[in-house]
Amino acid sequence: MKPLLIVISAPSGAGKTTLCDLLLRAYPEIEYSVSCTTRLPRPGEEDGEDYHFIPEEQFARLVKEGRFLEYATVHGHSYGTLRDPIVDALKQGQSVLLDIDVQGATKVRENIAKLPADDLLRQGYVDIFINPPSVDELRVRLEKRGTDSPEVIEKRMQNAEEELSHSGEYMYQLTNDDLRTCFKRLCDVINVKGGIL
Ligand code: 5GP
């Protein structure tokens, strides 16, 4: 497979994490880009696996040193994607999956557009937005997940509306009304972009 820089965004609750997990299982040559975040781990989350959970001061230092390809504040916490591990993976022929929010994806897209046409990051770039079946269904999913307080769910719902308004900026939009179908479509995108189909 041609090394891809795959950016996937979706409002929380749209099923993005499940889709990303399935993708990583189906394509061992895709590496998950572990983001840095200043939020606390949720039960079951592992440092270095789900995120690099770091303190605010360390995050601020990395920003100052220019180490992030992009960073953003989401739901009151800082999140950022380190540039070096991505470039290293692509150079080694590995694809990289970025699970980032709309603000982050916009910044990555802007940064990529400034690169020369033959740059590895630009050549392999593909971004995909996952739509939930509906806003109502999104609330149901967030409530069912049971990981967030009602206040956090409200905040996520407000963010979701804002994020949905940017879906048209992505190269591909998929709707996750049925997980299996959505996953199949996601694989098709990856296969086409990776030169397999
Ligand atoms: P959560 O806290 O639920 O894991 O993630 C909240 C949001 O932050 C999600 O939309 C997720 O995609 C986004 N996010 C995770 N990592 C990054 C990152 O490195 N950069 C940006 N901009 N957003 C991220």
Image (cartoon, helix red, strand yellow):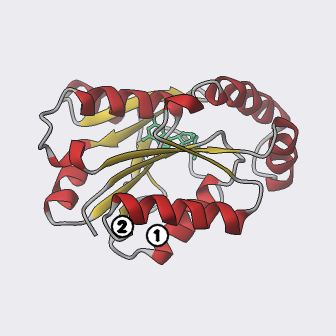
In this rendering, the answer to whether 149 lies above or below 15 is above
Q: Quadrant of residue 181?
A: bottom right
| 45 relative to 36, above or below | below
**Secondary structure under badge 2?**
strand
Describe the element under mark 1 as helix, strand or loop.
helix
- Find residue 3 and report its horizontal and vertical position in percent: 25, 61
- Kindly check if marks 2 and 1 are in contact, taking CB atoms under 8 A apart as contact: yes
Which of the pair 191/155 is nearer the observer? Answer: 191
Please name the residue that numbered disc 1 is placed on.
24
Label 1 Cα neighbours within 10 Å, binned few <14 / some 14-19 / many ≥20: some
Which part of the image, by quadrant, shows the N terminus? bottom left
Q: Is residue 193 visible?
A: yes
Q: Residue at x 49, y 36 (%)?
A: 170
Q: Nearer the viewer, residue 157 or 66?
A: 157
Q: Is residue 31 left or right of residue 188?
A: left
Quadrant for residue 9, please give it. Answer: top right
Can you identify the residue that label 2 sits on?
Answer: 30
Q: Is residue 159 left or right of residue 127?
A: right
Residue name at image x 50 percent, y 66 percent: 187
Q: Is residue 61 left or right of residue 158?
A: left
Name the one closer to the observer, 12 or 58.
Answer: 12
Amino acid type indicated by mark 2? Ile
Q: Quadrant of residue 12?
A: top right
Query: Badge 2 local density, few (<14 within 10 Å), some, or many (20+)?
Result: many
Compared to residue 186, the image places residue 162 above or below, namely: above
Looking at the picture, how far across and down is residue 152, in whole percent? 75, 34
> What amino acid type should be assigned to the residue bearing mark 1?
Leu
Can you give x and y, in whole percent of width and height, for residue 84 in the image? 19, 48
